[in-house]
Image (cartoon, rainbow, N blue to C red):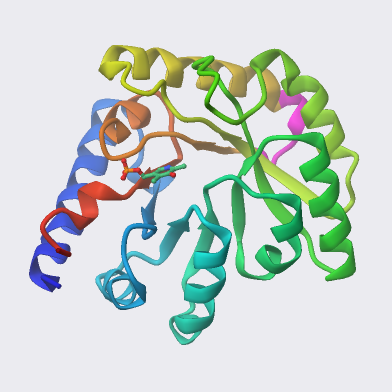
Amino acid sequence: MNVDRLKENVAEVHGRINDAAKRAGRDQSEITLVAVSKYVDTEATRAILEAGCKVLGESRPQQLWQKAADLAELNPTWHLIGHLQRNKVEKSLPCSQLIHSVDSKRLLNAINKSAAALEMTANVLLEINVSGDESKHGWHPTELPAALESCLALEHVQCHGLMTMAALGGGQQVARRNFAQLKSIFDETKPAAGSQFFQISMGMSGDYEIAIEEGATLVRVGSALWAGVVA
Ligand SMILES: *Cc1c(COP(=O)(O)O)cnc(C)c1O
């Protein structure tokens, strides 16, 4: 593992985040880098924590459980960014500070039930399918008001905002259109959703700067951080 390269990549991504924020007239403190560690093992994940990335994203629940246990003494903040099945909710909640990928009412209900049993509040984002890709999870934008209403009725779930993925292979212009749409849906929804509703999770290695220009508060970056670091 090339730790120097990892530190360079981290600095580069932070620099690009700050430049994009500046271009958009935003304060860089509004944007959090979620370093996606799903491509690498526990030791490389430890290295990126030590390089200063304290918010980590994993897409597979089992991998999240394992790394959360192995790296507990470093006290990272874990975000679950991938699809969550209901039978994995109970084990995921104690180690997920935010779940980005809540995409059905049944999942919301399962999260509420487990959170109640664990005597905790689960923090979630609602995943919205703005691109219309059939292969993608997430609510259709027209389903959002009902999804939010379900969420607000649950005592042990706090909805912090929205998440989306740009269309696969759509290029930068399509990504920008997808992100602008999520921001506009967010703005329409915000008055009904309360003060805790402020997160917009969008943008990955290929398009996080565009996402920031369009209003992202959480960018989920993986491959740009690991390039040249691990074999
Ligand atoms: C893997 C993944 C990312 C990171 O993608 P990169 O292109 O490697 O930056 C972001 N979000 C989700 C949901 C992912 O599964």
Query: How many circles with numbers are drawn on the protein?
Result: 0
Q: Is residue 166 above or below residue 69?
A: above
* Residue under the image location 25 percent in, 48 percent down: 223
Q: Is residue 19 left or right of residue 175?
A: left
Task: Classify 206 as above or below 62.
Answer: above
Q: Nearer the viewer, residue 160 or 138?
A: 138
* Nearer to us in this view, 128 or 200: 128
State the residue lying farthest toward the bottom: 73
Left or right: residue 98 versus residue 119 is left
- Give the image location of residue 200, x and y in percent: 52, 35
Residue 108, image x, y percentages: 79, 44
Q: Position of residue 220 (x, y in %)?
A: 39, 45
- Foreground of the two, 211 or 112: 112
Q: Quadrant of ligand 1?
A: top left
Relative to 113, say whether 28 is above or below.
Answer: above
Q: Give the quadrant of the N terminus.
A: bottom left
- The quadrant of the rendering that contains the C terminus is bottom left
Residue 14: image location, x then y, percent: 23, 50
On the image, which quarter does residue 179 sit in?
Answer: top left
Of 181 and 69, nearer the camera is: 69
Which residue is found at the position 9% from the left and 63% from the top?
5
Residue at 70% in and 64% down: 93
Magenta part of the chain = 191-197
Could you tell me which residue is drawn at 83 percent across and 61 percent down?
114
